[in-house]
Image: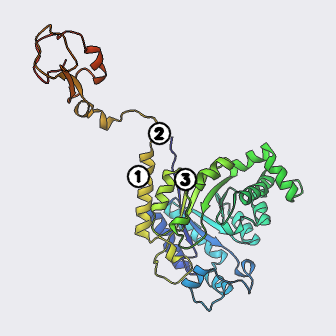
């Protein structure tokens, strides 16, 4: 039976450092029907050094002369803003979620007792951050952009150790042992889901590779969703049809605004259309049982055929292959009886098209 797809509206840093815009994004996510609105929690100086360069897409969408650190400082929300956003999310009936980008930010989010925490693709290889989150028992959504299967397995080994062997000294050998430990893997499965992702903004459709969701699901036996950075939302809808447990999509108030993620986001009306399309696909997937639905049963006699006389026949006349055929309506003998009627006698006088 198909379950509800978890839809995350990724507000991210599309608030441009403004609490007022951030609150408007919470409202927009709620109005669009998202289950979760997600932000990013970081201390700019703990996240990036002065020499850190911007990605190409960040260069295109922001002041080229601005460093990554300066950009992050401009987009950073204070911890106090989180409490305001959580209150608004609760008021609007959506879950508040955030992604930590440094250890102190993770500790802060853990102190908020959120239902879950999202770990971004850039931190899939950040073993200390992963281990701290797992050791704290956090429920995690782990994004896997830029990663190979081997790197994902390595990250899951770190998490399995944190969940299942928290008192053992950490290290590469310990992480690999935890990955082989059925009990640690079971603890992992209770806490972690994965997101397939291509880390480019916007993401070229040819680079999406939705088939990788099935590969990850088979390899790790964990729920797998999709974090969508493409233009539009058709790929998100396709991902749901392929079994995505979660869809994450950026939400902005204005795609033309200056900022790193606006251009790869949906505006509120389009996000609402995406949510509606996803729910339609969920309903269309059904329960997998192949049987007639109530809406089509009435069409059976109209669309199917019955065995009828192909020409006028006398009562008692022996029926040959050319004497009967199949035509609509389907209220008489089914066509599979055609061969068993050959060689029998007409039960009464029949005119062309009379049912047998």
**Residue, x 48% and y 51% (percent of image)?**
241
Residue underneath mark 1: 280
Q: Is residue 295 above or below residue 49?
A: above
Residue 10 in which image quadrant: bottom right
Image quadrant in which the C terminus is located = top left
Using the image, tell me which numbered label, if any, was put on residue 58.
Answer: none
SS for dot 1: helix
Q: Is residue 311 above or below residue 30?
A: above
Q: Are marks 3 and 1 in contact (CB under 8 Å)?
A: no
SS for dot 3: loop
Q: Position of residue 239 (x, y in %)?
A: 51, 56
Residue underneath mark 2: 287
- Specify whether residue 324 is in view: yes
SS for dot 2: loop
Using the image, tell me which numbered label, if any, was put on residue 244.
Answer: 3
How far separated are the C-alphas under marks 3 and 1? Answer: 14 Å
Q: Is residue 295 left or right of residue 245?
A: left
Circle nearer the N terminus (1, 2): 1
**Residue, x 78% and y 54% (percent of image)?**
157
């Amino acid at each position: 039976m198909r379950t509800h797809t978890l839809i995350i509206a990724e507000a991210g840093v599309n608030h441009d450092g403004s609490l007022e815009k951030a609150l408007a994004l919470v409202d927009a996510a709620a109005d669009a029907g998202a289950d979760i609105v997600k932000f990013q929690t970081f201390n700019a100086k703990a996240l990036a050094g002065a020499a850190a360069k911007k990605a190409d897409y960040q260069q295109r969408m922001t002041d080229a002369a601005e460093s990554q650190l300066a950009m992050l400082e401009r987009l950073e929300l204070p911890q106090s803003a989180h409490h305001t956003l959580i209150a608004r999310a609760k008021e609007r009936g959506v879950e508040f979620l955030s992604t930590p980008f440094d250890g102190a930010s993770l500790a802060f989010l853990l102190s908020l007792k959120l239902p879950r925490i999202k770990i971004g693709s850039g931190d899939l290889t950040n073993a200390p951050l992963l281990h701290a989150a797992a050791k704290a028992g956090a429920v995690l959504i782990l994004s896997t952009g830029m990663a190979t299967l081997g790197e994902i397995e390595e990250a899951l080994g770190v998490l399995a150790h944190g969940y299942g062997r928290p008192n053992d000294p950490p290290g590469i050998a310990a992480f690999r042992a935890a990955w082989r430990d059925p009990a640690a893997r079971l603890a992992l499965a209770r806490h972690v889901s994965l997101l397939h992702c291509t880390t480019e903004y916007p993401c070229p459709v040819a680079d999406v590779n939705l088939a990788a969701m099935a590969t990850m699901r088979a390899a790790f036996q964990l729920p797998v969703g999709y974090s969508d950075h493409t233009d539009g939302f058709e790929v998100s809808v396709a991902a749901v049809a392929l079994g995505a447990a979660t869809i994450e999509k950026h939400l902005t108030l204005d795609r033309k605004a200056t900022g790193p993620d606006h251009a790869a986001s949906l505006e509120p009306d389009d996000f609402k259309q995406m949510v509606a399309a996803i729910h339609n696909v969920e309903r269309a997937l059904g329960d997998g049982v192949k049987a007639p639905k109530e809406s089509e049963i009435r069409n059976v006699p109209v669309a199917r055929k019955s065995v009828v006389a192909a020409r006028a026949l006398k009562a008692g006349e022996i029926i040959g292959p050319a004497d009967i055929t199949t035509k609509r309506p389907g209220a008489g003998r089914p066509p599979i009886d055609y061969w068993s009627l050959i060689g029998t006698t007409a039960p009464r006088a029949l005119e062309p098209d009379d049912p047998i």
